[in-house]
Image (tube, grey):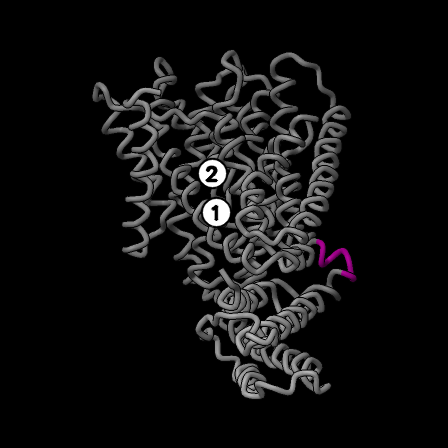
Amino acid sequence: MNVTTALQLVLLPAGAVAIAAIARWRGWSTPLLLVLAGLIVGMIAAPIQGVPSYRLDPEIVLLIFLPPLLYSAALDSSYLRLRDVRRPVGLLSVGLVLFSTAVVGLLTHAMIPSLPLAAAFALGAIVAPPDAVAAVAVARRLGLPRKVITILVGESLFNDATALTAYRVAVAAAVGQGVSMLDAFWHFAYAAGGGLVIGLALAYVIGRLFERLEDPLITNAISLLIPFVAYLTAEAVEVSGVLSVVVVGVFLGHRAYRTSYGARLVSYSMWKVIDFFLEIVVFLLIGLQLPLILQGLRGQNPWHVAGYSVAVFAAVVVARVVWVIPGVYLPRLLFRRIREREPKPTRAHTAVIGWAGMRGVVSLAAAFALPPDFPARDLLLFLTFVVVTGTLLVQGLSFPLLIRRLGVSSDQEVYKDNLSEAAAQQAAAGAALARLEELTGDGVIETHAEVVDGLRVQAERRAMGAWERLGGGVGPEGEETPSALYRRLRRAMLEAERSVLVRMRDERRIDDEVLRRVTRELDYEEATLARE
């Protein structure tokens, strides 16, 4: 690698970090500003000789960017909440993707009769899966209810598997490989089932391994490899690598409290940084693709291309709205069990979900991965770019306005979280005191009563400021020193608190977010007790 190539590799992430810093400083939407900056820089720099161009490599996106982004999102999700919204998530991640594929494919074939129907369906599969990164970022910043965020996150985790499977079937049919509807169905079932099985198998093995590892650096070094191992293992047997990665991430995220506190603390910070870095680079890359894509449209009628672009963009947006509204209300009308078990959805929540359909880099990567001799490849690539940037800019810019206009907020959930957190802290402190009494009440520990009293006071107050780390372990006569006694007893109390909190999460008395927040405080305190 020469110096010029190395410099090009540094310039892209450095520029992304700088633009993201400005966006965060000003309180703007980071994904939208990065896309706009990429568009502007790409158009200005394209005519200048010597300025590097950054063509989006589909293999790099699908092998390097997608697995860790999916894994990080899955780790941070809630298995229990996803289980609660499995029906709407399934309707969006499977039903809506296939519906959008059909709508866009039929419309494109009707507008361009010379384009084979299979190629038109390939375009539909390419633009069908929304990327909820931008939507969820805005939703969390503006305080959307947790259920809405969970639905959007769940959709983004699972829809890529559906879309990429449909994409492969459509591309195979377009290039002359005969594929019947029955073949397509079995291909989809094999890909989804295989990805699920491989994901569960890897999750079980890795989960057992993590329970036995105590070194946080080793644990997280392995964690860095997990998304790539899960993805490549599944893809090697031609099943869904996306689904495999998501299953592993959700499983390990749910069982994270069985790993060491050090591994959890390092993992939290590590994946936040990785997630942030990859996302900003991806969004900047999206904007930079315009000059490269325009080169392939030379000789085509610009008015025809503009008409196709507007029609496909509108079809993508309208198809989501048309699917979401009956998908929310029709099952309630048809099935009494759903009406009894699920609260009635509000119109505001339905509107937010219907408008949160921003596309992302997976769509562009799939378009770039089309074979060079694919019918109307350059046109399909441009239409994909229009849908991706159009949804990011149009829906992305209007999404905060819609949320504010509808008055959607999570204030009630925040209040309930505070109440449940207070109850959880009280229950955990009670468990810690009970464990302390169990360890000290039998008269074994008769000296250093001030240590026991200090622990008792701290558990009652639950002061989160950690005590200064103490040294020592065994005194000159072989007896346990006060500092060693303090650490041993406090660790036992923290473990008792953690067990109660996890049990309350499993019993649905507190949410995963509350559990993460409280246990992170316990992990910080336990970290101060550790000896170097």
At 56% from the left and 50% from the top, the residue drawn is 153
Task: Write down the residue under mark 2.
Answer: 360
User: Which x, y percent locates residue 385?
Assistant: 42, 31
Label count reads 2
C-beta proximity under 8 Å, tags 1 and 2: yes
User: Which of 172/447 is in front?
Assistant: 447
| Residue 391 occupies quadrant | top left
Callout 2: 10 Å neighbours few (<14), some, many (20+)?
many
Q: Does the magenta run of residues contain 396?
A: no
User: Does dot 2 land on a helix, a strand or a loop?
Assistant: loop
- Residue at the far front: name it: 477
| Residue 3 occupies quadrant | top left
User: Which x, y percent locates residue 434?
Assistant: 68, 82
Q: Is residue 177 visible?
A: yes
Q: Which contiguous range is marked in magenta?
A: 331-337
At 55% from the left and 69% from the top, the residue drawn is 522
At 24% from the left and 27% from the top, the residue drawn is 45
- Is 464 drawn above or below residue 502 in the view shown? below
Q: Is residue 19 left or right of residue 273?
A: left
